[in-house]
Image (cartoon, rainbow, N blue to C red):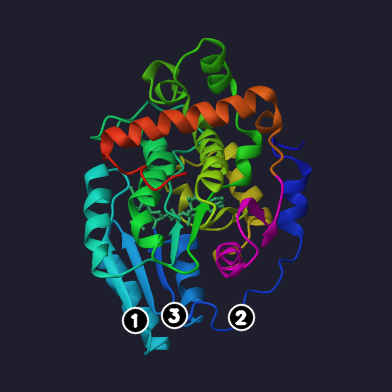
Amino acid sequence: MAGGLPWSFYRGQWSALPPAPEGDYLKGKIVVITGATSGLGLEASKQFAEASPEQLIFAVRSVEAGEKLLEQIQKTHPGLKGNVMYLDLMDLQSIKDFSEAIKVFDRVDILINNAGINPSFDKRPYQSTKDGYERVFQTNVLSPFLTTLLLLPLLKKSIDPKVIFTGSEVHHIAPSHLIESSIDNGQSILRAYNDEEKYFNPTRYFESKLLLQMLTRNLIKALPDITIINVNPGLAMTNLGREFNRKLSLSGMVGILWLVVNARTASKGARNLTSATAWQGGSQDYWSGCVPAASENVFLYSGKGYTATQVFYDEMLKEVEKISPGCTADLQ
Ligand SMILES: NC(=O)c1ccc[n+]([C@@H]2O[C@H](COP(=O)([O-])OP(=O)(O)OC[C@H]3O[C@@H](n4cnc5c(N)ncnc54)[C@H](OP(=O)(O)O)[C@@H]3O)[C@@H](O)[C@H]2O)c1
C-alpha cells in the first residue's frame, strides 16, 4: 500500500489505456446519462456523440447547462438527436418525475448512472437531504439504484439493455466496520449509513462506492437479461473535488501535486465509461483500465461480506418499495 491506495492503483494510472471504442456502436440506441454537464459525464457524452446514438439524453440537475452542452456537441455533430431532462439525485421526487417524463421514449437501451459527489476527506458535519437521507448516501447509492429500478420497464423494452454504474477503485480501501458492526449486532446497514452519530466524512465517499459495488453484485443476479457494469474510471481531472478545502496549506499543495502527477485527463477517464458501454461480453461487477477486472476489496470476498451484500440489498429493496411502491416488481 502507498498513501492508503494499493500499488495496483498507481500501476493502473500509469499504464496506457486501450484505445477508445470506435465505430457506430450506439447506432439505434437510446442512451441516458446522468451528470453529463461536468467531468467524466461531459467527456463521455462527447465520445458517445461520435458513436451515432439514436438519442442522447442528458439527465441533469441544471437543464440550462445541459442545453448548452447539447448545443455545443451538435455543432460538431449536426445530425445528433439529443434531449435534456431534469433530474436531481438529491430529490427523490425528481427521480420519480424523470422516470415518468422519459416515457415519451418507447424504450431506453443504455442507462449510465454517472452523477456523483465527493464530500471531501476532511472532518465535516452530517448533511441530510430533504428526503431525510445522508446526502452522499442518497446521491451515490440510493438514487442511482432507484433511478435504475424506475427505468426498468423502459430498459426491458430494449433488445440489448445495459446499465452502467460509475464506481471507483477507492471502494478497495473503504472501511467496512459500519457494515460489519451492523451485521454483528443484527442492525440495519442502511440505518447505520444514515445515522448522524456514526457519520465520518473523511471515508464516506469510499464507503458509498463500496455500497454501490454491493448493490451491483445483487442487481447482476436479479437482472440476468440486462448487462450491468460497475465502472472504475480511475483518478481523473474533473470537478469532483469542488468541495475540497481550497485554503493554501502545505498538505493541500502536496495533494494538488499528487493529483497532477497521477490523474488522467477527464477524456481518458471517460474512456472507461465508453468502453464499458460498447462491451458485448455481459455483466461485470467491476471494470477498470477499460477491461473487466476484479475488486481488491477483501471484505467483499469474506463470509461476512457475502452476508452483508445480501442483507444490504434486501434492506434497499424494502426502502425503495416505501419510496416508490412496485418499483422492485421487475426483479428476479
Ligand atoms: N474524477 C475521478 O477521479 C473519479 C474517480 C472515480 C469515480 N468517479 C466518479 O465519476 C462520477 C462523475 O464524477 P466526475 O469526476 O465527473 O465529477 P464532476 O466533474 O463533479 O461531475 C459530477 C456530475 O454529477 C452531477 N451531480 C452531482 N450531484 C448531482 C445531483 N444531486 N443530481 C444530479 N446530478 C448531480 C454534477 O452536476 P453539475 O454539473 O450540475 O454540478 C456533475 O455533472 C462520479 O460518480 C464520481 O464518483 C470519479
Amino acid under disc 3: Gly
Amino acid under disc 2: Glu
Amino acid under disc 1: Lys
Q: Position of residue 81 (x, y in %)?
A: 34, 81
Q: Residue furthest top?
A: 185
Dot 1: few (<14), some (14–19), or many (≥20) neighbours within 10 Å?
some
Tell me the element at label 2. loop
Q: Nearer the viewer, residue 28 or 70?
A: 28
Q: Cα distance, mark 3 to mark 2?
A: 16 Å
Q: Residue at x 32, y 47 (%)?
A: 89
Q: Quadrant of the N terminus?
A: top right
Q: Residue at x 44, y 19 (%)?
A: 188
Is the shortest distance between ligand 1 and the CB of mark 3 under 8 Å?
Answer: no
Mark 1 touching mark 2, by CB under 8 A? no
Task: Tell which circle, 1 or 2, labels the residue nearer the N-terminal end.
Answer: 2
Tell me the element at label 1. loop
Quadrant assignment, res 61: bottom left
Q: In the rendered view, would you say 325 is above or below 257?
A: above
Residue range in magenta is: 270-294
Is the shortest distance between ligand 1 and the CB of mark 1 under 8 Å?
Answer: no
Q: Which residue is mark 2?
A: 22
Q: Position of residue 308 (x, y in %)?
A: 56, 26
Q: Nearer the viewer, mark 1 or mark 3?
A: 3
Task: Tell which circle, 1 or 3, labels the residue nearer the N-terminal end.
Answer: 3
Q: Nearer the viewer, residue 32 or 244?
A: 32
Residue 28 disc label:
3
Viewer can see residue 309: yes
Residue 81 disc label:
1
